[in-house]
Image (cartoon, rainbow, N blue to C red):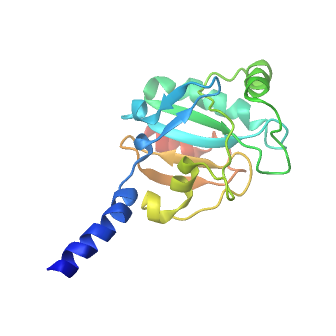
Amino acid sequence: MLILFTLIFIAQPIMADHHKSFHDFKVQDIYGDEFDLSQLKGKKVMVVNTASKCGLTPQFESLEELYRNYSSENFVIIGFPANNFMNQEPGTNEEIITFCEENYGVTFPMMSKISVKGDDIHPLYKWLTQKEKNGLTDSEVAWNFQKYLIDEEGNLVKYFSPRQDPLSEEIISWIEG
């Protein structure tokens, strides 16, 4: 009996972490305010790491189009600026949001700059990239503009490579489905 109790006691934190959902996280928006992801319950979410000085930066245009087309249908995009790839997001939060608004008319929520890989990886990205935490799959953020899809209940359902067009049929079918 003692062995069983000990196993349950030891396994509980591991099991609790596995059952964590996207909605259990709180992050900072680009203005420094707390953004509780639980407010997105009931919505499909695309999480994307962004950069202002990348060959894929023009994807901001497609992301904004996708957001404008589907935000009224319980869909949201959350952008996370990150400087993990060849110093392609060197700016401050203020510089990043100014760039996004002036050059691409971005209206979807942008968060504060974080790290999406390495020793200083943000806890949300640990969850997105580790099967033991998200319950679906292991992945590594390959470059800027990698896309993670989260369902209405806060579960990771799929991820797409950085080169995947945000307006692809596969992504639109998922949003409409």
Residue that appears at 20% across and 73% down: 5
Name the residue located 59 percent from the left edge and 27 percent from the top edge: 109
The correct choice, above or below, for 86 with respect to 63 in the image is below
Q: In x, y percent, where is residue 6?
A: 25, 74
Residue sitting at the far front: 2
Choose between 54 and 96: the one closer to the eye.
96
Question: Residue 61 in the image: x percent, y percent?
Answer: 72, 30
The quadrant in which the C terminus is found is: top left
Q: Is residue 27 left or right of residue 11?
A: right
The reply, left or right, for residue 112 in relation to residue 87 is left
Q: Can residue 112 be seen in the rendering of this structure?
A: yes
Residue 105 in which image quadrant: top right
**Residue at the extreme left of the image, as rendered:** 1
Residue 154 placement (x, y as % from top left): 40, 44
Query: What is the quadrant of residue 51 in the picture?
Result: top right
Q: Residue 80: where, in percent of width, then height?
A: 65, 38
Please tell me whether residue 80 is drawn above or below residue 86 in the rendered image.
above
Q: Nearer the viewer, residue 106 or 3?
A: 3
**Location of residue 135 with respect to 157 vertically, above or below:** below
> Which residue sits at x=79%, y=43%?
56
